[in-house]
Image: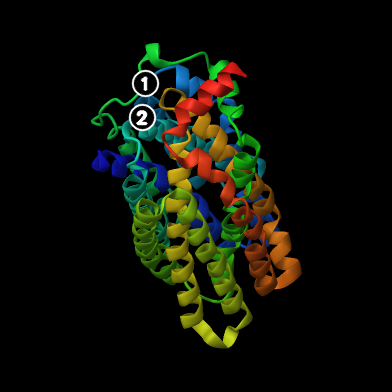
Amino acid sequence: MLAVVALFYFVEGLPFGVFHRVWPAYLREAGVSLETIGAVSGLSLAWSLKLLWSPLVDRFGEHRQWISAALVVMSASLLLQTALPPSPLGAALWAALALFCVASATQDVAIDAYTIGLVPRGQEGPANGVRIAAYRVALVVGGGGLLLLPRWIGWPATLGAAAAVHLALAFGVWGAPRAEARPAERRPLGAALRAWLARPGAAGVLGFVLLYRLGDLAMGPMLTPFWIDRGLTREELGLVSTTLGAVATIAGGAAGGLAVSRLGIPRALLLLGAFALVSNLGYAGAAAWPEGGRPAVYAASLAESFCSGLAAAGFLAFLMRICEREHAAVQYAALSALYALPGTALGAASGWGAQQLGYPGYFALTALLALPGLALVGVTAAWAAPETIGRDQERGAVA
């Protein structure tokens, strides 16, 4: 089971390496402004809007078919990007980037639903440790590995290589076992969602999901431009931030999965979220202390990666715990879309914020944005207990 989880989250993580690492470096080196790079990060709106088409993934075809089709579309988008100039960033390139994001978001719906159907209740902690590890390995390949190529083969060939990897993966997902719920197990979708949302404490839980990772989402789009503007090379970005950062995140994910198993989900969420907040302050310190040079940036990056793995393990375990297997595609898509929505808005404005406040002030502001989510951790306790899921949903259905 864990090997299958690792495969599918490698597939899911690969496009994020392109989105979060390759595109910002590619565009910044082409002379694209911080404001425009921040606006490109706003294309992550696709991950918030995926709820709109998630019922299609839930009702039609197999999850593996959706994943393969999405990978083919992403491969075609990358090939199109090789033929379009990055600066000025024209309408055709905007369309190609948006197509890639929509396909990746669709793939995520299918992969998350598949995993919820595969992983037994109570095993979310170990599964999410593996999930985070595989995801970060994919970021090494899709981010750090690809960033090493432009020096030798140029950016168009690098994007072409990324297209080839996506296409190869499209043909590699069919060997996994089928994990969809049987049609007889599925209730009508509208009734299932109404019962789910009518559970006691739903408003507080949704507020928690909305705010818990806000600090990380707001900081992320400006990390690669910060490295470039500090004079660090693509190779350093690929080696330290992406490759060594992936190792740190894997370690953080493993530690976070262990914390979830030992402490339970609510207590782990509070502890691990606090560590993530501190990592934002680490980047603010590195930005405010240019005399620290490369070592300060390296240390901030590795601390941020480790703490991100910690927080993600607890948060993803909670999201998996509260979803019904038979409607996992729609319910998990709703939660992850809600989680991504404020980050999309802040990410789109992140370039403006960094320009106005400077990197130190902006990174410090992102740490403050993490506080409201931590204040809402207490509302997760009732929903995180596996034995309450069926009882609360029955009460919601009656209501």
Q: Position of residue 182 (x, y in %)?
A: 35, 16
Q: How many residues crowd mark 1 within 10 Å: few (<14), some (14–19), many (20+)?
A: some
- Say whether residue 155 is left or right of residue 2: right
Q: Which mark is residue 117?
A: 2
Is 387 placed above or below 22 here?
above
Res 228 seen here: no
> Label 2: few (<14), some or many (≥20) within 10 Å?
many
Query: Element under label 2?
Result: helix
Residue 158 or 324: which is nearer the viewer?
Answer: 324
* Residue 269 at x, y percent in the picture: 49, 54
Under mark 1, the amino acid is Ala
Tell me: 306 left or right of 4: right
> Label 2 is placed on what type of residue?
Gly
Image quarter of residue 367 = bottom right
Asked if labels 2 and 1 touch by Cβ distance under 8 angstroms, the answer is yes
Answer whether residue 194 is visible to the viewer in this image: yes
Residue tagged 1: 181
Q: Residue at x 32, y 32 (%)?
A: 118
Q: Residue furthest right?
A: 356
Say whether disc 1 or disc 2 marks the residue closer to the N-terminus: 2
Secondary element at image label 1: loop
The quadrant the N terminus occupies is: top left
For the residues labelled 1 and 2, the Cα–Cα distance comes to 7 Å
Q: Position of residue 247 (x, y in %)?
A: 34, 63
When the figure is inspected, residue 44 is found, relative to residue 35, above or below; the finding is above
The circle on residue 89 is: none
